[in-house]
Image: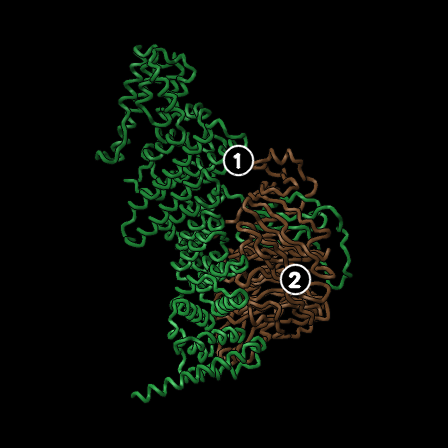
Amino acid sequence: MFECQEISAEHKDLIHDVSYDYYGDRIATCSSDQYVKVWDRNEEGKWILSSCWKGHSASVWKVTWAHPEFGQVLATCSFDRTATVWEEIVGDTPGPGKSGQRHWMRRTNLVDSRTSVTDVKFGPKAQGLQLATCSAEGIIRIYEAPDVMNLSQWTLQHEVQCKLSLSCLTWNCSLSRAHPPMIAVGSDEPGSGGKVFIYEYSENSRKWIKLDTVSCITEPVHDIAFAPNLGRTFHILGVATNNVRIINLTPTDDEQSQQSGITKLDIQTVAQFDEHGSTVWRVCWNVNGSVLCSSGDDGCVRMFRIHSKTLWKQEGVLKGDGNQVPTAMEAAQSGPQHIPQGSPVGSIASQTARYIKLGSISQPSREPWY
Amino acid sequence: MENNAKTFLIPNDLCRRAGMGASWRPMNEIVVFPYEKRSVKQKDQPTSFASNAPVSIFHIRRSVILFHPILRKLVNESNGVFLTLQASFKTKPSDLKMEILSISRQYRSIIRACLENLQDEVGKPNITVAERSEMHNYITIFYSVECVWHLCEILFIDVIPGNIVLPHLLDWVRFHFPKHERNAAILLASNSEGLELEEEFWPTVFGNLLQGRIKVVRALLKQHSAANSPIFQLVQHLLKSMPTYNVMNNVSVSEFNLQWRHWVMDIQQQIDSKQFINNHNLNLLMRLLTGEEEAWAEIQSQCEAWYEFLAGWLCYSETTVKTFELGQYAKQSIKKMRMQNHLRHLDRVLLAAMEFDMLLVIKEVQEMTENGWFVSHFTDLLHHSGRLSSLEKEVEGFSADKLRESFILDYGTTLVGHKSLWQVGLSYLDHCPKDGLPTIQLLLPRISFDSEAKVHKLIREAISRGLKNVAQSICKVQGMRSLSRGRLGNALTWALKSQDGPFTSYLADKYLKQYISSGELNNTDLLDNLGSSMLASDRLIFLGKYNEFHKLYQEGEYKECGHLLIALMVSKIVPKFFWPVLLSEAIPLLESEEIVFSANDTFTVLHCLEEKEEIPELSDKISILRLAAARNLSRALMYEAQCENLV
């Protein structure tokens, strides 16, 4: 069974991205209404709007948190061709026990792109404070803050030309030091040819080098995400294209790659799910990379669970349903009892910490493990 | 198989009209929100959904009943048993049979204690209707869990001499259908004759008969008003002479079967001679003893479940049934009760167990909705008993280790997501040899903390698992938090623990700058006790030494003070912004009554002064410094000359 808690996000238009801080205690949202909002969870589990500001002069596509080691830092990217780094400043504490005034300060505006910046992601913290952006003009840019205590200084370290208009980007967040930094990007340009490219940072040449193109994906790609790596020898990439793809990237140790110092990848599509009908919009991973979540044209959110290296199975579906918004009283009655199949129950639109059991349709049948 | 996935409905119309996007919230929540795919090629304008109507975000999580406070004891105590088992497996993996059985019983007694707790709670008058129905729900779940576990213990874990399973089966049924025993006790306690007038009398007699409690049946019949009639006497006699099978008393199975057949024949004769024809109930009782099909068909409506029927039926027709024959009899009794098409989940699990389909049992118990508590502990137990690995040969691609680990990993991960059960969760992950440590490495740093006590706990857990980098990262985060709250001393303490050089330098700079603006060094007790941790960064060494200088100065140890100052000046670790302060510190020493600086020292001061001339903050002090240095130089030169003359 699932239960759900509703938080009114107060955006005036659809939300483009919702991002959680490292601990899941803070939410950042961004929207077509050009605003960025930050929500904090209080001790009772309620979400309180702590900051809200106009971040850009156009739609804000993505918002993402830096690792808390660098403080409270956000990056956003927008249709207005910029990416911005924000840092939360806590004013002088007015007195013991009280928290100071907080506000988010624009630390830097990255204005190198001549077109819409479509994605922004902080790199793994082992590499210091790095930020990668990709843009519609087809360029990946890697920025770095050389002094992590001074976020107003960012240097553009690398510019990688991709030729195709880029829509999404992901860092490989492997825990192993044996894996050099890796980025995968996706393009939503129509036309033939591969749409997912894998890059790796080569320590020798101090350059980002294209390792491979995932040639089996030729449809436009809308989102892409590396799974957190549990010390595996291979990397798992989730791709949102005309279907959900799960791809294993296995570095191979042949002589050639050892000589050149450039990783050679063995690319294998291990799962493909067509349930979304046509276009898949977003993909994201849970904390330990065992479940992939996707959303798409059919209006559903689908979950896929790993069963073995090459076996993935759909586990659950979430679907919007407006006809069944219950009255407050129904919701109150629907307390802890198991909801009979086919009778959805929802929540009251209030900011309480209460979770409401979700109704479901179709028979439960969890796949066994073996 | 794709169609099998369960669909859940999000009660929001905007989600339906626009579609949804999803994100993950650490640890275990999914977040959905109304979302529409926009492309950069589209014009950037408000979507058709833009309005003043609220846009909501929905946090979706699995409902975890184990997080309910009333089940806390179950979670914690079973954790203890789990760890005991892992430990004893490590130390003496050869002789585990008895240990495993005792562990299994411990688990079951924990479930029973939990059920008792729940029963008590349900009985309390001050709980709401919703709470009560929730408790009832838990009782149903754990009652089923106990029922399955008990049967599996008999079949998979216990070593039954001669495979004679019936006595165990009866024990199991007696525990799960305690009604008859309870009723019998009530009836007998009333100690009145003519018990047959009680409505419950005959159902209780038959109930106890089905559970093999012959003594109770006889006791009840003695309280019948006609107990002294010859026919009742005959029944008493027949019941008393019923042969019982016991492996221990050296009767072979065939010998017993012979005795049994004689006994049945005896009863049959009495029935055939229409001895009991006047008493329907007694007649039925006797026919049941002979295993007559029609009699059993008559009694089956009194059975709540097919396995209650099964136990009774076997008791009087297949007393020496072997464990491996149970499956076929189970199917027969289900068929007799006409339940094939409406088996509940519990029925299916029990049937699978009796058919010895261990994998099916494991598969089914995953749906017990107790969030994996049962399946993980149970699979772990089976694995240690060696039962699971024996299946590896039979089922292709099956790995007992993997199966066990996957459940424990899931269970541990679930617990780590809870704010007070995270340590229990970690102890499960510790026993996942393959993915346990990497999972801990991913999850542990994400456990949110708001108190120093919890930070220390987290760090201890990280260090004890050799995850030094995780511990350091946690320290750094706590340092950054202290810094943002303006607590410099705390921040420095954590920075030192995190061994982050640049961060400590940054903080040391903050101290020095504070000193410049306020003229006071803060947290001197911390700085006094830096010791070797000072070596974290050059800037911190400087701060520490400078603090020492201050202390010496206050104590009036001007000579040593002077040495330290000169040492600092030549050390090349003085931050640029601090030179004006450092040089001004020299003035009182140059001017002191007693000569502090030697001629050489004074040259050093002058040399530094020369080098740093351009620093603007120094401009108003240069002349004073030059003057003081010149005066001190003359004094020092004269003094040193005198000393040389004396020598």
B642 on left or right of A48 = left
Query: Which quadrant of the rendered structure holds the N terminus of chain A?
Result: top right
Q: Nearer the viewer, residue B157 or B278?
A: B157
B290 on left or right of B13 = left
Secondary structure type for disc 1: helix
Give the colour of chain B: green
Q: Nearer the viewer, residue B32 or A361?
A: B32
Residue B356 appears in which quarter of the rendering? Answer: top left
Q: Position of residue A134 (x, y in %)?
A: 66, 68
Q: Position of residue B339 (x, y in %)?
A: 50, 33
- Measured Cα–Cα span from mark 1 to mark 2: 58 Å
Residue drawn at (40%, 60%), measured in percent from left and top?
B463
Q: Nearer the viewer, residue B344 or B52?
A: B52
A123, above or below B458, in the image:
below
Q: Which chain is brown?
A: A
Image mark count: 2
| Residue A4 visible in the displayed image | yes
Residue A83 appears in which quarter of the rendering? Answer: bottom right
Q: Chain of mark 1?
A: B
Residue B598 appears in which quarter of the rendering? Answer: bottom left
Q: Which numbered disc, 1 or 2, marks the residue closer to the eye?
A: 2
Residue drawn at (53%, 35%), measured in percent from left and top?
B341
B619, above or below B86, in the image:
below
Q: Amino acid at mark 2?
A: Thr
B565 on left or right of B162 = right
Q: Chain of mark 2?
A: A
Q: Which residue in the structure is indicated by mark 2?
A: A76
Secondary structure type for disc 2: strand
Q: Position of residue B498 (x, y in %)?
A: 45, 64
Badge 2: residue crowd in 10 Å (few <14, some 14–19, many ≥20): many
Q: Which residue in the structure is indicated by mark 1?
A: B341
| Residue B398 visible in the displayed image | no
